[in-house]
């Protein structure tokens, strides 16, 4: 599972054991840049984070689009449902101006654009497929990951077991994780059936079902916890030796971990 993935990927350290957990930038470096934009991805990459997490939904043209919500409303000055909008219409939305003039003109990018940027400049991806995806839609994502040469630098995740199962069947070379707000009985068996390397949980879910999270780690699954932005949360999760922390503040988290693990 997770250990085998680390060995196959050539990882130099085992996060959460005698080394710090992975720093995972939530929606890119969303603490300083507009979430899920190339600016946020570039800011996270510049930090050298372990993984850059982004979300995708499918456009009316069947294109995987990097955006968290099913609509444009919250993160752009435009309106409309992603699944009902063409790629051209989505490309016109300004995804950065709301955060300040310096980000005006940032776009809602197709997945292939983000993959190409990471391939060219470095960085690894934690890719969340929002909601249920059909096998045909998952195959489109798999094709784009493989075409970009990013199958060895991408982990996919979803709350939908159906979607994770389609990822297993259509892109077995791409590691996958099962997402849970709150883990529940049977998740370990389900994750094993899905051949997942990890079960990623919310901070609230960790608190409510800590025993299940610990059982998952003992069973060999990786555990990334989201979305954690405070030193109090980080300290609690360091003690638990989880494998990754998904945060809006990766720069602050890196400084915190440096003080804990690299103090002179």
Image: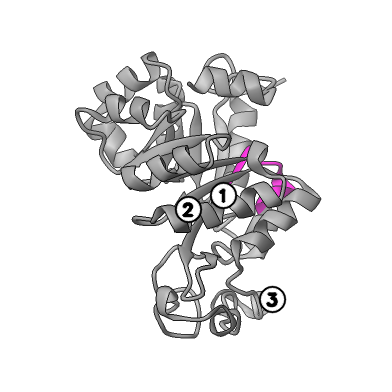
- Which label's residue is closer to the chain start, 2 or 3? 3
Looking at the image, is 70 positioned above or below residue 51? below
**What residue appears at the point 39 percent right and 19 percent down from the top-left corner?**
217
> Does the image show residue 210?
yes
Residue identifier under label 2: 138
**What residue appears at the point 26 percent right and 34 percent down from the top-left corner?**
183
Q: Dot 3: what SS?
A: helix
Decide whether residue 47 is among the magenta residues. yes
Give neighbour class at mark 2: few <14, some 14-19, many 20+ (Cα, 10 Å). many
Give neighbour class at mark 3: few <14, some 14-19, many 20+ (Cα, 10 Å). few
Q: Residue furthest right?
A: 120
**What residue appears at the point 68 percent right and 44 percent down from the top-left corner?**
150
Residue 117 tag number: none
Tags 1 and 2 touching, CB below 8 Å = yes
Residue 142 tag number: 1
Residue 102 tag number: 3
């Amino acid at each position: 599972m997770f250990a085998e993935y680390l060995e196959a990927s050539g990882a130099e350290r085992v996060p959460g054991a005698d080394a710090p957990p992975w720093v995972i930038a939530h929606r890119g470096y969303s603490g300083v840049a507009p979430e899920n934009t190339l600016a946020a991805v570039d800011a996270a990459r510049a930090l050298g984070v372990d993984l850059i997490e982004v979300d995708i939904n499918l456009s009316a043209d069947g294109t995987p689009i990097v955006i968290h919500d099913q609509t444009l409303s919250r993160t752009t000055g435009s309106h409309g449902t992603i699944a009902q909008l063409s790629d051209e219409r989505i490309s016109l939305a300004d995804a950065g101006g709301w955060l300040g003039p310096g980000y005006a003109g940032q776009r809602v990018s197709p997945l292939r654009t983000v993959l190409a940027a990471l391939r060219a400049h470095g960085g690894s991806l934690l890719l969340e497929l929002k909601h249920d995806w059909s096998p045909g839609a998952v195959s489109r994502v798999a094709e784009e990951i493989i075409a970009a040469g990013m199958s060895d630098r991408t982990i996919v995740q979803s709350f939908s077991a159906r979607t994770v199962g389609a990822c297993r069947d259509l892109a077995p070379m791409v590691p996958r994780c099962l997402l849970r707000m709150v883990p529940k009985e049977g998740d370990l068996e389900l994750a094993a059936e899905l051949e997942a390397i990890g079960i990623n949980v919310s901070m609230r879910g960790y608190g409510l079902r800590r025993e299940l999270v610990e059982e998952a780690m003992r069973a060999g699954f990786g555990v990334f916890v989201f979305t954690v932005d405070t030193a109090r949360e980080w300290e609690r999760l360091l003690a638990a030796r989880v494998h990754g922390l998904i945060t809006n503040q990766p720069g602050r988290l890196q400084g915190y971990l440096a003080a804990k693990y690299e103090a002179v």
